[in-house]
Image (cartoon, rainbow, N blue to C red):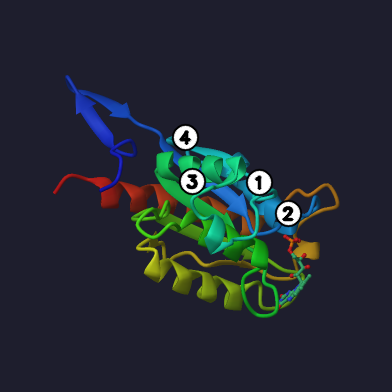
Amino acid sequence: MQSQRCMVESVGGIAMINVCRMLGFAGSIRKDSYNKSLLRAALELLPEDAALEVFDLEGIPIYNQDLENQPAEKLKEFKARLRSADAILIATPEYNYSIPGVLKNAIDCASRPYGDNAFAHKPVAIMGASPGMIGTARAQYHLRQCFVFLSCFVLNQPEVMVSFAQEKIDRDGKVTDQKTRELIKQLLENLVDWTRRLTSPK
Ligand SMILES: Cc1cc2nc3c(=O)[nH]c(=O)nc-3n(C[C@H](O)[C@H](O)[C@H](O)COP(=O)(O)O)c2cc1C
Protein backbone atom coordinates (compact mmCIF):
# COMPACT_ATOMS: atom_id res chain seq x y z
CA MET A 1 0.00 0.00 0.00
CA GLN A 2 2.65 2.53 1.06
CA SER A 3 6.27 2.84 0.08
CA GLN A 4 8.58 1.19 2.59
CA ARG A 5 11.03 4.07 2.85
CA CYS A 6 9.98 5.16 6.30
CA MET A 7 11.18 2.10 8.14
CA VAL A 8 14.04 1.14 10.36
CA GLU A 9 15.71 -1.96 8.94
CA SER A 10 18.51 -4.09 10.24
CA VAL A 11 20.99 -5.14 7.57
CA GLY A 12 23.74 -7.48 8.81
CA GLY A 13 23.02 -6.40 12.39
CA ILE A 14 23.57 -2.71 11.55
CA ALA A 15 20.53 -0.49 12.00
CA MET A 16 19.76 1.35 8.76
CA ILE A 17 17.54 4.37 9.33
CA ASN A 18 15.61 5.23 6.23
CA VAL A 19 14.39 8.76 5.95
CA CYS A 20 10.67 9.52 6.08
CA ARG A 21 10.12 11.92 3.19
CA MET A 22 7.34 14.43 3.84
CA LEU A 23 5.69 16.82 1.42
CA GLY A 24 4.45 19.99 3.10
CA PHE A 25 2.22 22.72 1.77
CA ALA A 26 0.29 25.69 3.13
CA GLY A 27 -3.29 26.58 2.35
CA SER A 28 -2.18 30.17 1.84
CA ILE A 29 -0.22 31.61 -1.04
CA ARG A 30 0.43 35.00 0.52
CA LYS A 31 4.05 35.95 0.94
CA ASP A 32 3.97 36.65 4.70
CA SER A 33 1.60 33.80 5.53
CA TYR A 34 1.61 32.64 9.14
CA ASN A 35 0.98 29.14 7.87
CA LYS A 36 4.05 29.24 5.65
CA SER A 37 5.90 30.22 8.84
CA LEU A 38 4.69 27.02 10.51
CA LEU A 39 6.20 25.03 7.65
CA ARG A 40 9.50 26.91 7.97
CA ALA A 41 9.50 26.06 11.68
CA ALA A 42 8.85 22.42 10.77
CA LEU A 43 11.98 22.48 8.58
CA GLU A 44 13.97 23.57 11.64
CA LEU A 45 12.39 21.03 13.96
CA LEU A 46 12.48 17.87 11.83
CA PRO A 47 13.49 14.60 13.45
CA GLU A 48 16.79 13.33 12.09
CA ASP A 49 15.07 10.48 10.27
CA ALA A 50 12.76 12.80 8.32
CA ALA A 51 13.04 15.16 5.37
CA LEU A 52 10.54 17.83 4.37
CA GLU A 53 10.02 19.35 0.95
CA VAL A 54 7.75 22.42 0.86
CA PHE A 55 5.51 22.90 -2.17
CA ASP A 56 3.76 26.19 -3.06
CA LEU A 57 0.18 25.75 -4.27
CA GLU A 58 0.30 29.00 -6.26
CA GLY A 59 -0.37 28.32 -9.93
CA ILE A 60 -2.65 25.30 -9.64
CA PRO A 61 -5.57 26.30 -11.89
CA ILE A 62 -9.15 26.32 -10.67
CA TYR A 63 -10.66 22.87 -11.07
CA ASN A 64 -12.80 22.36 -14.16
CA GLN A 65 -14.03 18.84 -14.88
CA ASP A 66 -14.01 19.59 -18.62
CA LEU A 67 -10.21 19.91 -18.42
CA GLU A 68 -9.54 16.95 -16.14
CA ASN A 69 -7.61 15.08 -18.80
CA GLN A 70 -5.42 18.07 -19.70
CA PRO A 71 -3.78 18.83 -16.33
CA ALA A 72 -1.55 21.91 -16.02
CA GLU A 73 2.18 21.27 -15.50
CA LYS A 74 1.92 22.62 -11.94
CA LEU A 75 -0.81 20.14 -11.10
CA LYS A 76 1.13 17.25 -12.66
CA GLU A 77 4.11 18.23 -10.51
CA PHE A 78 1.95 18.43 -7.37
CA LYS A 79 0.45 15.00 -7.97
CA ALA A 80 3.86 13.46 -8.69
CA ARG A 81 5.31 14.90 -5.47
CA LEU A 82 2.33 13.73 -3.43
CA ARG A 83 2.75 10.23 -4.82
CA SER A 84 6.45 10.03 -4.11
CA ALA A 85 6.11 11.38 -0.54
CA ASP A 86 5.86 8.99 2.39
CA ALA A 87 3.71 11.44 4.36
CA ILE A 88 1.93 14.77 3.92
CA LEU A 89 2.12 17.83 6.21
CA ILE A 90 -0.46 20.60 5.77
CA ALA A 91 -0.53 24.04 7.40
CA THR A 92 -3.92 25.61 6.84
CA PRO A 93 -5.47 28.97 7.60
CA GLU A 94 -9.17 29.18 8.43
CA TYR A 95 -11.38 31.12 6.02
CA ASN A 96 -15.00 31.70 6.98
CA TYR A 97 -14.94 28.80 9.44
CA SER A 98 -13.54 26.38 6.85
CA ILE A 99 -10.51 25.72 4.67
CA PRO A 100 -9.38 28.32 2.12
CA GLY A 101 -10.42 27.85 -1.50
CA VAL A 102 -6.80 27.56 -2.59
CA LEU A 103 -6.36 24.46 -0.43
CA LYS A 104 -9.71 22.87 -1.30
CA ASN A 105 -8.99 23.49 -4.98
CA ALA A 106 -5.57 21.84 -4.76
CA ILE A 107 -7.08 18.83 -2.99
CA ASP A 108 -9.92 18.55 -5.50
CA CYS A 109 -7.52 18.81 -8.45
CA ALA A 110 -5.08 16.23 -7.07
CA SER A 111 -7.89 13.78 -6.30
CA ARG A 112 -9.11 13.57 -9.89
CA PRO A 113 -9.79 12.17 -12.50
CA TYR A 114 -11.82 9.59 -10.59
CA GLY A 115 -9.55 6.64 -9.81
CA ASP A 116 -6.39 8.78 -9.95
CA ASN A 117 -6.41 10.19 -6.41
CA ALA A 118 -2.84 11.24 -5.57
CA PHE A 119 -3.68 11.41 -1.86
CA ALA A 120 -4.82 7.79 -1.59
CA HIS A 121 -3.59 6.00 1.54
CA LYS A 122 -1.19 8.77 2.56
CA PRO A 123 -0.48 9.49 6.21
CA VAL A 124 -1.34 13.17 6.81
CA ALA A 125 -0.62 15.63 9.62
CA ILE A 126 -2.41 18.96 9.97
CA MET A 127 -1.53 22.23 11.70
CA GLY A 128 -2.79 25.76 11.34
CA ALA A 129 -2.34 29.35 12.49
CA SER A 130 -4.74 32.26 12.78
CA PRO A 131 -4.68 35.70 14.40
CA GLY A 132 -8.01 34.73 15.98
CA MET A 133 -8.64 32.85 19.24
CA ILE A 134 -9.81 29.52 17.75
CA GLY A 135 -6.53 28.76 15.96
CA THR A 136 -8.07 27.17 12.81
CA ALA A 137 -9.90 24.38 14.71
CA ARG A 138 -12.99 24.63 12.52
CA ALA A 139 -10.92 24.55 9.32
CA GLN A 140 -8.89 21.59 10.56
CA TYR A 141 -11.99 19.50 11.27
CA HIS A 142 -13.35 20.29 7.80
CA LEU A 143 -10.02 19.26 6.33
CA ARG A 144 -10.14 15.95 8.19
CA GLN A 145 -13.58 15.37 6.69
CA CYS A 146 -12.21 15.80 3.13
CA PHE A 147 -9.62 13.14 3.80
CA VAL A 148 -12.21 10.55 4.73
CA PHE A 149 -13.34 10.27 1.12
CA LEU A 150 -9.75 10.45 -0.13
CA SER A 151 -8.74 7.42 1.99
CA CYS A 152 -5.99 9.20 3.90
CA PHE A 153 -4.80 8.33 7.38
CA VAL A 154 -4.89 11.59 9.31
CA LEU A 155 -2.85 11.74 12.50
CA ASN A 156 -4.97 12.62 15.55
CA GLN A 157 -2.49 14.11 18.01
CA PRO A 158 -1.15 16.60 18.82
CA GLU A 159 -3.63 19.13 17.49
CA VAL A 160 -1.53 22.12 16.46
CA MET A 161 -3.98 25.03 16.49
CA VAL A 162 -2.01 28.25 16.75
CA SER A 163 -4.23 31.08 17.99
CA PHE A 164 -3.16 34.75 18.22
CA ALA A 165 -0.48 33.98 15.64
CA GLN A 166 0.78 37.57 15.60
CA GLU A 167 2.02 37.01 19.17
CA LYS A 168 3.81 33.75 18.34
CA ILE A 169 5.34 34.52 14.95
CA ASP A 170 7.61 37.52 14.60
CA ARG A 171 7.80 40.07 11.78
CA ASP A 172 10.44 38.00 10.01
CA GLY A 173 8.06 35.03 9.93
CA LYS A 174 9.86 33.02 12.61
CA VAL A 175 7.83 31.00 15.09
CA THR A 176 9.17 32.34 18.37
CA ASP A 177 6.69 30.82 20.82
CA GLN A 178 8.36 27.88 22.56
CA LYS A 179 5.14 25.97 23.24
CA THR A 180 4.18 26.20 19.57
CA ARG A 181 7.62 24.97 18.51
CA GLU A 182 7.33 22.01 20.89
CA LEU A 183 3.92 21.12 19.47
CA ILE A 184 5.22 21.23 15.90
CA LYS A 185 8.19 19.06 16.89
CA GLN A 186 5.85 16.53 18.52
CA LEU A 187 3.58 16.54 15.47
CA LEU A 188 6.55 15.73 13.22
CA GLU A 189 7.77 12.94 15.49
CA ASN A 190 4.29 11.46 15.65
CA LEU A 191 3.93 11.68 11.87
CA VAL A 192 7.13 9.69 11.38
CA ASP A 193 5.96 7.09 13.90
CA TRP A 194 2.47 6.96 12.35
CA THR A 195 3.94 6.49 8.87
CA ARG A 196 6.14 3.67 10.11
CA ARG A 197 3.20 1.92 11.71
CA LEU A 198 1.21 2.16 8.49
CA THR A 199 4.04 0.85 6.33
CA SER A 200 5.42 -1.90 8.56
CA PRO A 201 5.08 -5.41 7.20
CA LYS A 202 2.44 -7.40 9.11
C1 LIG B 1 -11.69 35.42 3.38
C2 LIG B 1 -11.14 35.33 4.78
C3 LIG B 1 -11.85 34.68 5.76
C4 LIG B 1 -11.32 34.54 7.04
N1 LIG B 1 -12.01 33.81 7.98
C5 LIG B 1 -11.43 33.51 9.15
C6 LIG B 1 -12.04 32.58 10.06
O1 LIG B 1 -13.09 32.05 9.83
N2 LIG B 1 -11.37 32.29 11.21
C7 LIG B 1 -10.15 32.84 11.51
O2 LIG B 1 -9.61 32.55 12.56
N3 LIG B 1 -9.56 33.73 10.67
C8 LIG B 1 -10.15 34.06 9.50
N4 LIG B 1 -9.54 34.90 8.62
C9 LIG B 1 -8.28 35.54 8.99
C10 LIG B 1 -7.11 34.62 8.66
O3 LIG B 1 -6.93 33.73 9.74
C11 LIG B 1 -5.85 35.46 8.45
O4 LIG B 1 -6.00 36.25 7.29
C12 LIG B 1 -4.60 34.60 8.37
O5 LIG B 1 -3.48 35.44 8.43
C13 LIG B 1 -4.58 33.78 7.09
O6 LIG B 1 -3.52 32.86 7.11
P1 LIG B 1 -2.09 33.17 6.47
O7 LIG B 1 -1.42 34.18 7.37
O8 LIG B 1 -1.38 31.86 6.46
O9 LIG B 1 -2.29 33.74 5.08
C14 LIG B 1 -10.07 35.10 7.34
C15 LIG B 1 -9.35 35.77 6.34
C16 LIG B 1 -9.88 35.88 5.07
C17 LIG B 1 -9.06 36.58 4.00
Does label 3 or label 4 sit earlier along the sequence?
4
Q: Is there a contact, CB below 8 Å, between mark 2 and mark 1?
A: yes
Give how far apart the Cα atoms at labels 2 and 1 are: 7 Å
- Of callouts 1 and 4, which one flags the residue occurring earlier in the amino acid sequence? 4
Q: Quadrant of residue 5?
A: top left
**Mark 4 lies on residue:** 48
Residue extending furthest toward the top = 12
Separation of disc 3 and disc 2 at Cα? 18 Å
Q: Where, by quadrant of the figure, is residue 44 drawn?
A: top right
How far is disc 1 from disc 4 in space, using C-alphas?
A: 24 Å
Q: Amino acid at mark 1?
A: Asp
Residue found at the far left of this picture: 202
**Does the residue tagged 1 have its C-beta within 8 Å of any atom of ligand 1?**
no
Residue reaching furthest to the right: 171
Q: Which residue type carries mark 3?
A: Lys
SS at mark 4 in the image? loop
Residue corresponding to mark 3: 79
Drawn side of residue 49 relative to residue 59, left or right = left
Q: For marks 2 and 4, give the one nearer the viewer.
A: 2
Q: Quadrant of ligand 1?
A: bottom right
Q: Is mark 2 within 8 Å of ligand 1?
A: no
Residue at x-position 73% and y-position 54%? 29
Q: Which sits earlier in the primary sequence, circle 3 or circle 1? A: 1
Residue at the spot of label 2: 29
Q: Amino acid at mark 2?
A: Ile
The location of residue 188, given as percent across then percent down, is 49, 50
**Residues tagged 3 and 4 counted as in contact (Cβ below 8 A):** no
Residue that appears at 64% across and 59% down: 62
First-in-chain label (3 vs 2): 2
> Label 1: which residue?
56
